[in-house]
Image (tube, rainbow, N blue to C red):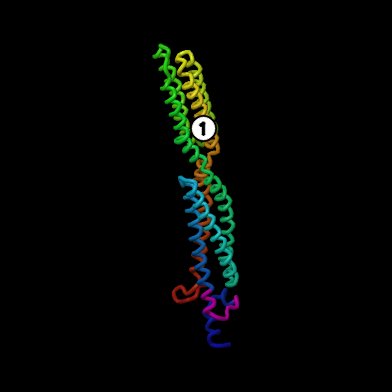
Amino acid sequence: MSATRVLAAVLLPASLAMAGCGDVNAALKELADARHLAGDLQVAFTKATDASNRAVMADTDPASVAYAQEADAEKRAVHDAIGRLRPLLEALRFSDETRILNEFEGRFGDYEKLDRQILDLAVENTNLKAQRLSFDAGQAAADAFRDALLALHGTGDAWRLRATTAGALAAVREIQVLQAPHIADPDDASMTSIETRMKTEEKAARDALAALPGLIDPASRPTLATATAELDRFMDVNGRIVALSRRNTNVRSLALSLNQKQQVIPPCQQSLSTLREALARRGYPKGRWGA
């Protein structure tokens, strides 16, 4: 046996020598590659969790989708790093590090299942879409209803006409006010209560419209028909808002991200830290190889 091989057998830890690494430089390179991959693994996992969080918090559909795709790409990078690191650890016969890697892989599987659910909900953005409907189409329909009511002309009982139209408009405005808490509410029973109040206000608005034919002049009847059509349009938009709000995907994804997800991330991080620490101890601490 050459002097170099003898020296390698003496200096290399037993785990490396038993692996049959005849060249100390090759063994050192494998160890360096393992450490590098463990670092890549930790970085990719951190990027995956950050991108997932951004997908949940994004305020536009394109941003949610882009961040969700970024999170998926980083999770694929995690799997790639695991696939390249495991053969190195097995070749080096690092049984403890292999066990830690397997532990992380199992914990990462739990993380992935939950994160898939979170991302699928986040990209639907139903609460955000409901909010936009409320601010845009809902507001436009409510304002058009108001304008039609204000254009009505009475037959002489002006105060009664004003009181009736004001009551109809107030009912619609109350429904608008109720949309925001419905969109934000995570509780089904609470949303049902809000919807009941909406139906009560809708009835008040329609009852007011039903009382208007006897208070307006014949020339205002087409305008009253317009007001009725705008109320129908507003209630149609409100129904779409309620349906989207009921899905609650933004609220649910945020709740999962803030609660269950925070229970599966730390164990993954702990496994990765333990793995890197174990690999760091392999080498020449204080001038000698670690076992």
Give the residue number, with chain letter if any, for mark 1: 237
Q: Residue furthest left?
A: 159
User: In the rendered image, is residue 185 in sight?
Assistant: yes
Q: Is residue 1 above or below residue 179?
A: below
Which contiguous range is marked in magenta? Answer: 18-29
The residue closer to the viewer here, 264 or 45, is 45
Disc tally is 1
Does 33 lie within the magenta span? Answer: no
The residue closer to the viewer here, 15 or 203, is 203
- Residue 177 coordinates in the image, percent (x, y): 44, 30
Q: Residues within 10 Å of mark 1 (few under 14, many from 20)?
A: many
Query: Residue drawn 51% across and 58% down?
Result: 45
Does 28 lie within the magenta span? Answer: yes
Q: Secondary structure at mark 1?
A: helix
The residue closer to the viewer here, 185 or 268, is 185
Quadrant of residue 189 within the rendered picture? top right
**Quarter containing the N terminus:** bottom right
Query: Residue drawn 48% across and 53% down?
Result: 51
- Residue 270 coordinates in the image, percent (x, y): 51, 58
Q: Residue furthest top?
A: 156
- Residue 95 coordinates in the image, percent (x, y): 59, 67
Q: Disc 1 residue type?
A: Val
Q: Residue furthest front?
A: 219
- Residue 102 coordinates in the image, percent (x, y): 59, 61
User: In the rendered image, is residue 96 in sight?
Assistant: no
